[in-house]
Image (cartoon, grey):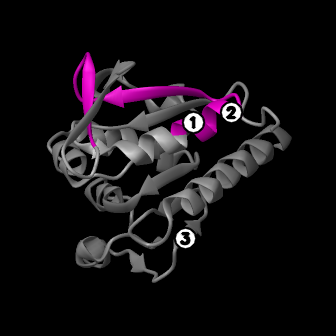
Amino acid sequence: MTKALLGQKLAVLVANGFCEKDLTEMQRALLKTGANVRIIGMDQGLVNSWNENGWGLNFAADQMLSEALGANFSMLVIPGGQRSVDKLKLTAHTRRFIGSFIDARKPVVVFDQAVDLLAFAQRISGRTVTGPDNVKDEVTNAGGTWAEEAFVIDGNLMTGGEATGPRAEFVAAALEFLTESAIVEKAA
């Protein structure tokens, strides 16, 4: 595999309770392409994942959300996990951080329940997205358009995940999306 994302600094936004498989599978794929993956957490230290049946592995946060700036990263990935989403919605820093990527038209990949964070960040109006059915009403009430597809790409935004199709397929499509975005950026 080529190092198509070599030199790209990618932020992964999480809080305790994020989906372990979303992070590990996406991170593994990104590292193979040479991406510099940095975990942004709500607190300094370790962030605890959820592994379907209970608490999972701990991951070191590279930077606190309150100190992180979207301008310092070229791409954003937000794993799913309802516990993580609920915690991230407790701070305006989430709105600021996500908004900086969307506003700068940087590539953003959002897994499952995390699509709700786009509504929280007030960056979903006029966008077409997909995700688990339990966030559909919040997305449409915030002005987003809901699609019944495995994944959706709307400009610089890609949404989907295990709730809409096999995770492995979404990760592969997300990697292709991020790689193509990097190629377009280099050509510009």
Q: CA distance from mark 2 to mark 3?
A: 24 Å
Residue under numbered circle 3: 152
Left or right of 167 in this view: 18: left
Are the residues at dot 1 and dot 2 in contact (C-beta closer than 8 Å)? yes
The residue sitting at the front extreme is 53
Name the kind of residue labelled 3 in the image: Val
Labelled disc at residue 32: 2
Q: Nearer the viewer, residue 91 or 88?
A: 88
Give the crowd class for mark 2: few <14, some 14-19, many >=20 residues within 10 Å. Answer: some
Q: Is residue 50 above or below residue 166?
A: above
Q: Which callout, 2 or 3, points to the residue nearer the camera?
A: 2
Horizontal relation, residue 91 to residue 26: left or right: left
Which of these two is toward me, 105 or 63? 63
Nearest the eye: 68 or 54: 54
> Can you give x and y, in whole percent of width and height, for residue 179 in the image?
72, 46
Which quadrant of the figure has residue 10? top right
Query: In this orientation, does residue 142 appear?
Result: no
Q: Residue at x 58, y 50 (%)?
A: 105
* Position in image of residue 136 (x %, y %): 29, 77
In the displayed structure, 153 sits above or below 17; it is below
- Callout in the foreground (3, 1): 1
For residue 124, what is the image quadrant?
A: bottom left
At 41% from the left edge and 28% from the top edge, which residue is drawn? Answer: 39
Identify the residue at image location x=45%, y=62%.
Answer: 161
Is residue 165 among what the camera can see? yes
Query: Residue 135: x, y in percent?
Result: 26, 71
Amino acid of disc 2:
Lys
Of mark 2 and mark 3, the one earlier in the sequence is 2
Range of residues picked out in magenta: 27-50
The stretch drawn in magenta includes residue 36: yes
Mark 1 lies on residue: 28
Left or right of 165 on screen, residue 88:
left
